[in-house]
Image: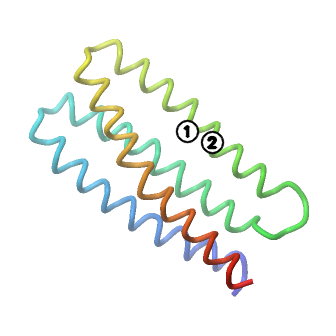
Amino acid sequence: MSRGVEALRFGAIATSIAALSGFLVLALGRSQGQRVLVFCVAGWAIMAIVGVAAGAWMVRAHGRPGSGFLAALAAGMLARLFLSAAGAAWAARHDVQTVWAFLGGLFAGYVPLQVFELTWFIRRDRRS
């Protein structure tokens, strides 16, 4: 399978996983009010969008000579870090409840995709 097709396959599965965690965020956050929901979805979106994009980039670069994989890994980590810090500062301008909502969204967007990404690369290395 070509790297481009493999990256598309990874992206499709990762997007499905992110959507499932997004539905959970919507279901739980909706009952807490609109402001909490906005911060929760914002945290989830940061992790989901960056996770899918950086993960697909890593899949495409994995195994190639050069520093493409390391660049993808670092870019994904730095994007998550910067956007999470900016979002946390934004949430902190409101109140503690919005900070917790934002952190919950970050967690819900990060953990399922990280587990999938790790599983993907472990299985890929075992097949090689």
What percent of the width, then of the height, locates residue 77? 63, 42
What percent of the width, then of the height, locates residue 94? 28, 14
Q: Secondary structure at mark 2?
A: helix
Q: Quadrant of the C terminus?
A: bottom right
Q: In the figure, residue 54 lies in which quadrant?
A: bottom right
Residue at image position (58%, 73%) is 8
Q: Secondary structure at mark 1?
A: helix
Residue 53: give its label.
Answer: none
Q: Quadrant of the N terminus?
A: bottom right
What percent of the width, then of the height, locates residue 15? 44, 64
Is the image coloured rainbow, by chain, by secondary structure, or in one colour? rainbow
What percent of the width, then of the height, locates residue 52? 53, 58
Front position in the image: 90 or 122? 122
Q: Is 48 rendered above or below residue 4?
A: above
Q: Residues within 10 Å of mark 1 (few under 14, many from 20)?
A: many
Residue at image position (36%, 33%) is 103
| Amino acid on which the number 1 mark rests in the picture | Arg
Q: In the figure, residue 104 lies in which quadrant?
A: top left
Residue most extreme to the left: 31
Residue most extreme to the top: 93
Residue at image position (46%, 41%) is 46
Front position in the image: 55 or 114? 114
Q: Residues within 10 Å of mark 2 (few under 14, many from 20)?
A: some
| Amino acid on which the number 2 mark rests in the picture | Met
Q: Are marks 1 and 2 in contact (CB under 8 Å)?
A: yes
Q: To which residue does mark 1 refer?
A: 80
Residue at image position (67%, 67%) is 59
Q: In the figure, residue 60 lies in which quadrant?
A: bottom right
- What is the spatial separation of the Cα atoms under label 1 and label 2, in whole angstroms? 5 Å
Q: To which residue does mark 2 refer?
A: 77
